[in-house]
């Protein structure tokens, strides 16, 4: 039986306990995991890029609500590049050396991503490339940079699959005169040749083109069966207006910009049967997408754009890499990201030896009865595509 201390011994015991408590080291809370990124928060691109920030903030709240990373709270350090892509390199240096960011998410666009990737590689610090879809971002010598979105080179994949499924042979490829569209069209031309399709030379058109009669004349002369164009929503709208005016309807009409929700407003019922190319769709049945879209809408009172999905997916991929590596050691994280194969709301993630995305492909969206429907790939389709592109004289007014 344990005896209690005598009354004489109690003061000495109390003093000893007090001294012991003073001598014991104070337990300090663990420092947060700093996740850094730079993006336009002012300047001409700020409104366009706002969803990048919103997607990361949503993820931060979710991951902290679930206990953080490795039991540590996540702190976002988001710097403003003032819509200047050339500032990215300096800002990522600041994230590494001033803010001590342990994890990096890439900036807005391929041009800024080039600068950020170079800094990450020199610093041997993992960077998940959230939006840079250009192949140039992933140089052969890079080992710490990993791509999330579908590369520009994959934007023709669904259109060529549609052409082949229809048994078409003659394809006309058009590209807006900018680096992104030209990269898409160049890769599509090579892939068309591999598939046995006759694509000919790429038709380059200038920004602001409103009349496509010369291209239609050449397409008719060449017996073109599939018209596949890479550009913006206004380009797609002007193509449709030209088609309607000239009574031209190729068997397959795919224009990247036709996937933009604004396309319907520009051409009304003439949008029917056009197919667009989309990097992300809120209705796609990718893993976790319905929950992501609902959570985003609750927090921000808006539907998520592809940029929101890209930043959120980049963060989820980082989260999973940390979970598997059980560490923030950069080489362990690099190995985890190189081997990782998962699906996010944006779609699948898997990379090649240079960190370039090889699993994700853009979706095809067709306008059917005034509604945007996913028609490719089949596993994510919300409707079956209706081909061939209907002739103008056979169309009926929608009610």
Image (cartoon, rainbow, N blue to C red):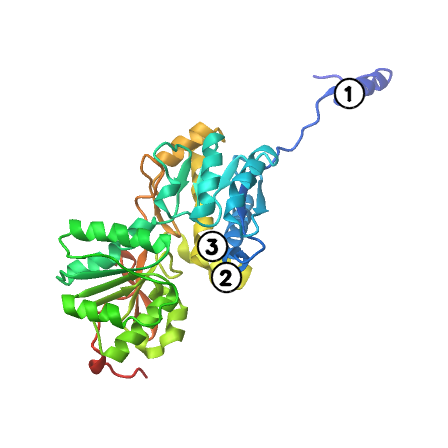
- Report whether 368 appears left or right of 72: left
Cα separation between marks 2 and 1: 55 Å
Who is closer to the viewer here, 73 or 190? 190
Q: In the figure, 55 relative to 172: above or below?
A: above
Q: Would you call the spot at circle 3 few (<14 residues within 10 Å), some (14-19), or many (20 or more)?
A: many
Which x, y percent locates residue 378? Answer: 25, 58
Of tags 2 and 1, the one toward the viewer is 2
Of tags 3 and 1, the one toward the viewer is 3
Q: What is the quadrant of residue 68 in the picture? A: top right
Which x, y percent locates residue 105? Answer: 49, 43
Who is closer to the viewer here, 316 or 166? 166
Image quadrant where one finds the C terminus: bottom left
Q: What is the quadrant of residue 157 in the picture? A: bottom left
Q: Look at the numbered disc 2 and give the secondary structure of its residue.
A: helix
Cα separation between marks 3 and 1: 55 Å
Q: In the figure, 53 relative to 265: above or below?
A: above
Q: Residue furthest right?
A: 8
Which x, y percent locates residue 48? Answer: 50, 59
Residue drawn at the location 15% of the way across and 69% of the way down: 221
- Give the label on residue 308, or none: 3
Q: Tags 3 and 1 in contact by the CB under 8 Å rule?
A: no
Q: In the figure, 258 relative to 53: above or below?
A: below
> Which residue is the site of mark 1?
17
Residue drawn at the location 29% of the way across and 84% of the way down: 397
Q: Look at the numbered disc 3 and give the secondary structure of its residue.
A: helix
> Which residue is the site of mark 2?
297
Q: Is residue 330 visible?
A: yes
Image quadrant where one finds the N terminus: top right
């Amino acid at each position: 039986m344990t005896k209690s201390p005598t009354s004489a011994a109690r003061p000495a015991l109390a003093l000893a306990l007090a001294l012991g408590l003073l001598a014991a080291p104070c337990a300090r809370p663990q420092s947060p995991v700093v996740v850094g990124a730079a993006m336009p928060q002012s300047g001409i691109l700020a409104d366009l890029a706002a969803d990048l920030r919103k997607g990361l903030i949503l993820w931060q709240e979710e991951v902290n609500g679930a206990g953080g990373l490795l039991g540590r709270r996540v702190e976002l350090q988001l710097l403003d590049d003032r819509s200047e892509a050339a500032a990215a390199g300096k800002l990522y240096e600041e994230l590494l050396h001033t803010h001590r960011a342990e994890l990096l998410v890439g900036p807005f666009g391929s041009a800024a991503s080039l600068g950020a990737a170079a800094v990450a590689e020199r610093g041997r610090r993992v960077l998940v490339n959230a939006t840079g879809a250009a192949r140039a971002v992933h140089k052969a010598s890079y080992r710490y940079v990993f791509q999330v979105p579908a590369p520009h080179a994959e934007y023709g994949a669904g259109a060529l699959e549609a052409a082949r499924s229809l048994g078409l042979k003659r394809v006309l490829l058009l590209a807006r005169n900018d680096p992104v569209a030209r990269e898409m069209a160049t890769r599509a031309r090579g892939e068309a040749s591999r598939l046995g399709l006759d694509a000919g030379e790429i038709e380059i058109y200038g920004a602001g083109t409103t009349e496509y009669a010369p291209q239609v004349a050449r397409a008719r002369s060449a017996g073109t069966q599939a018209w596949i164009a890479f550009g913006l929503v206004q380009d797609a709208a002007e193509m449709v207006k030209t088609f309607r005016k000239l009574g031209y309807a190729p068997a397959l009409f795919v224009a990247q910009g036709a996937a933009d929700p604004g396309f319907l407003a520009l051409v009304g019922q003439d949008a029917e049967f056009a197919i667009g190319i989309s990097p992300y769709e809120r209705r796609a049945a990718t893993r976790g997408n319905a929950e992501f879209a609902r959570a985003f809408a609750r927090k921000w009172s808006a539907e998520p754009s592809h940029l929101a999905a890209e930043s959120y997916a980049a963060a989820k991929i980082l989260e999973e890499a940390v979970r598997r590596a059980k560490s923030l050691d950069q080489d362990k994280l690099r190995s985890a990201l190189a081997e990782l194969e998962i699906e996010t709301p944006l779609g699948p993630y898997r990379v090649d030896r240079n960190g370039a995305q090889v699993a994700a492909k853009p979706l095809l969206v067709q306008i059917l009865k005034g509604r945007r429907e996913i028609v490719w790939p089949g596993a994510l389709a919300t409707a079956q595509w209706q081909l061939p592109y209907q002739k103008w004289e056979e169309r009926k007014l929608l009610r």
